[in-house]
Image: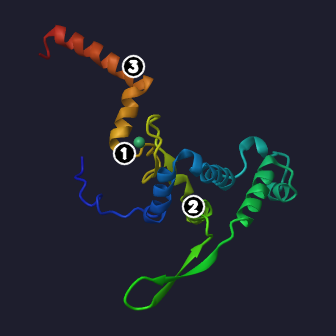
Amino acid sequence: MPVAKSHVSHRFLGEEEARPLVEWMNRVGKKRSKPVEDLLKRLLRVMVGPQEQEIDRADKQPYLAVVRNRTPYAQAVKNLQRELKRLHRWPELTLVQSSEARVYFRWTSGNETVNAKLSLVELAAMDLAWRLRPCKLASCRKWFFARFKHQWSCCTAHQQSFYRQSDEWKKHRQKWQKDYRKLKVSGFVK
Ligand SMILES: [Zn+2]
């Protein structure tokens, strides 16, 4: 296996941008982050495009079908557009606490759930919303930014725990132990 040398310092696109959002979702807990989670699901649903069964094969212009609001997908787009319109924000002027009088600007809505939704939309605009995931391990479910497509756990330890818990892994282990016993009996291994 190649030596993982640069991986520690390697910057993953969007990870820094997603960090405050991920931390907020984990800090406030499931109930308060629910509206953001719902928005994430709706964003992903819309960005992935219409599902196979929603596309009328006879329809030569699926784009027009969406515009004319003839599909469930069109309804999902419309609902999402309506929700996004409600995410009002403004530039906030903040005075920096220092010996000098300095100011800086930042975008805010004055509401932390709306701010979280805005961060999520920014991530979606970078086409990275799908990387925001809850840990696969049922006892964890912590939000994290997936560095790779196949990453479904917040850390290596939880990835391993998940496989230890899963049926597939149990079967694999049982089979392996059975074979191992056979090998032991055969005298090849001690
Ligand atoms: Zn986890």
Percent across and percent down for residue 39 are 65, 53
Q: Which residue is drawn at 86% across and 51% down?
A: 70
- Alpha carbon separation for disc pair 2 and 1: 23 Å
Residue on which disc 3 sits? 171
Closest to the camera, between mark 3 and mark 1, is 1
**Amino acid type at image mark 1:** Cys
* Ligand 1 picture quarter: top left
Percent across and percent down for residue 171 are 39, 19
**Amino acid type at image mark 2:** Ala
Out of 177 and 153, give the one closest to the viewer. 153
Out of 99 and 181, give the one closest to the viewer. 99
User: Which disc is residue 155 wearing?
Assistant: 1
**Is 138 above or below relative to 46?**
above
Disc 1 CB within 8 Å of nearest ligand 1 atom: yes
**Mark 1 secondary-structure assignment:** loop
Percent across and percent down for residue 54 are 78, 44
**Mark 3 secondary-structure assignment:** helix
**Is 148 above or below relative to 94?**
above
**Amino acid type at image mark 3:** Lys
Disc 2 CB within 8 Å of nearest ligand 1 atom: no
Q: Residue at x 47, y 51 (%)?
A: 26
Q: In which quarter of the image is the C terminus?
A: top left
Q: Which residue is drawn at 42% across and 82% down?
A: 97
Out of 13 and 36, give the one closest to the viewer. 36
What scheme was used to colour the molecule?
A: rainbow
Q: How many marks?
A: 3
For residue 55, side relative to residue 31 (left or right) = right
User: Which disc is residue 116 wearing?
Assistant: 2
- Alpha carbon separation for disc pair 3 and 2: 42 Å
Would you identify the image quadrant in which residue 99 lies? bottom left
Percent across and percent down for residue 52 are 72, 43
**First in sequence: mark 3 or mark 1?**
1
